[in-house]
Image: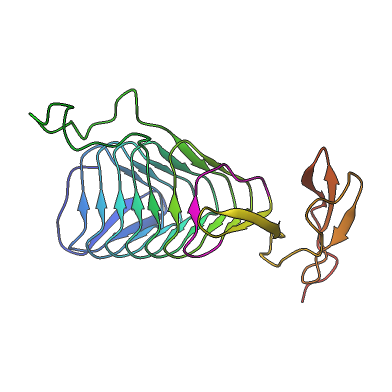
Amino acid sequence: MDGSHGQDCRLEQGLMAVRIHETAIIEPNVQIGDDTAVWDNVHIRRGASVGHHCIIGEKTYIGQDVVVGDLVKLNAVVYVCTGVTIERGVMVSAHVTFTNDTYPRATDPKLDALRSSEADESTLSTTVREGATIGAAAVIGPGLKLGRFSMIGMGSVVTRSVEDFSLVVGNPARMVGYVCRCGSRLELPLGSSDGATTECGSCGRCFKIHGGRVLETDDSPRRTS
């Protein structure tokens, strides 16, 4: 895809059109999947990849070579820097900020020149695993992994990796519980011993503690309401 400011574009890729607002900036060599909507004043840098059936909210920035999977929602004013991979089915709420540098400085040590903004050996990678949710205005530190279907509370500052199905909140973020695929909190106390089990009160999915981690034991919900 060529760099574009164009009119309200509908770029035909496969069976469904990509919808790009006329104010969005799409740099060269960007891939965008079918039926994805890119809203006003979005900026997607060169080499980035966005999957199908995504929503990229207004004023969101997606850095160079970022990978965004299918069925992802990036709400308004999200900052996704170079080095971030967002897997399938992730929700990133408004004003979330990712970071990628442990020792950020504007200049060289002598204050003689600006440091390059390009990725280098100090640029760390972060992965958001499938199904995770990041609440509004959260800040995600560099070099982390946010687990499958984990949930990051709004306004949290995440400085450590997060396990699957975990709920973390605060500054710095700490684990306070577990969540189901459907987003409901599980009635499973922190520190439960191996073999402990629970059933989601909303959808009926079953979970257990094994090796100190929460595992899903039944993908089929027992209830549909």
Drawn side of residue 219 relative to residue 170, left or right:
right
Measured from the top left, where is residue 150 in percent x and y? 62, 53
Front-most of residues 216 and 174: 174
- Residue 156 counted in the magenta span: yes
- Residue 74 counted in the magenta span: no
Magenta residues, dominant SS class:
loop
Q: Residue at x 37, y 62 (%)?
A: 95
Drawn side of residue 34 relative to residue 21, left or right:
right
Measured from the top left, where is residue 155 in percent x and y? 46, 63
Q: Quadrant of residue 118?
A: top left
Query: Which part of the image, by quadrant, shows the C terminus?
Result: bottom right
Q: Residue at x 25, y 38 (%)?
A: 46
Which residue occupies the extreme right position in the image?
Answer: 195
Q: Residue at x 40, y 58 (%)?
A: 96
Query: Which part of the image, by quadrant, shows the N terminus?
Result: top left
Drawn side of residue 200 relative to residue 80, left or right:
right
Measured from the top left, where is residue 151 in percent x and y? 60, 58
Front-most of residues 191 and 85: 191
Q: Which residues are magenta?
A: 153-164
Measured along the vertical axis of the image, is residue 34 above or below residue 55? above
Q: Residue at x 44, y 48 (%)?
A: 51
Front-most of residues 3 and 95: 95
Drawn side of residue 62 relative to residue 213, left or right:
left
Measured along the vertical axis of the image, is residue 39 above or below residue 132? below
